[in-house]
Amino acid sequence: QVQLVESGGGLVQAGGSLRLSCAASESTFSIDLMGWYRQASGKQRELVASILSGGTTEYADSVKGRFTISRDNAKRSVYLQMNSLKPEDTAVYYCHVEEEQPGGYFASWGQGTTVTVSS
């Protein structure tokens, strides 16, 4: 299983910025999908943004125009630049990757990093 190490969470005031990073351990297989999910207290985990190996991105409507996802395939890393943060962005953010292996795709999750946005 791919190990994911996340960093970059913290406490920020509304309107501020944070950058999340996630690095995947080495593997003989390539990563197709990389993304970020979040789970606020008492709510279900939801997709924030994802990016395919070819660069195609997808964003939740709530973060469009404020968050930008990017990846470095050579470093097996994915990043989430979060600008104009709002209190409703407060959540635990999880890195998610899908590795292409013989027979299908194998998903892995990070341990989560907490983002708290104060009003």
Image (tube, rainbow, N blue to C red):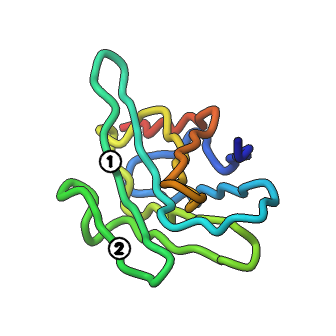
Secondary structure of the residue carrying tag 2 is: strand
Rendered position, 116 above or below 35: above
Q: Nearer the viewer, residue 50 or 7?
A: 50
Considering every residue shown, the one lying at the far right of the view is 26
Rendered position, 6 above or below 32: above
Residue at 37% x, 59% y is 49
Along the horizontal axis of the image, is 103 left or right of 68? right
Considering every residue shown, the one lying at the far left of the view is 61
Spatial CA span between label 1 and label 2: 12 Å
Instruction: Give how far across and how far down residue 105 sits, in percent.
Output: 49, 54
Q: Quadrant of residue 43?
A: top left
Residue at 43% x, 69% y is 51
| Quadrant in which the N terminus is drawn | top right
Q: Amino acid at mark 2?
A: Thr
Along the horizontal axis of the image, is 35 left or right of 76? left
Q: Amino acid at mark 1?
A: Leu
Instruction: Give how far across and how far down residue 69 sits, in percent.
Output: 46, 69
Rendered position, 26 above or below 7: below
Instruction: Give how far across and how far down residue 84 sits, in percent.
Output: 36, 61
Q: Residues within 10 Å of mark 1 (few under 14, many from 20)?
A: some
Q: Quadrant of residue 114?
A: top right
Which residue is denoted by mark 1 in the rendering? 47
Secondary structure of the residue carrying tag 1 is: strand
Circle nearer the N terminus (1, 2): 1
Instruction: Give how far across and how far down residue 33 sits, in percent.
Output: 47, 63
Residue at 51% x, 61% y is 34
Along the horizontal axis of the image, is 119 left or right of 20? left
Along the horizontal axis of the image, is 111 left or right of 82? right
Which residue is denoted by mark 2 in the rendering? 57
Considering every residue shown, the one lying at the far top of the view is 42
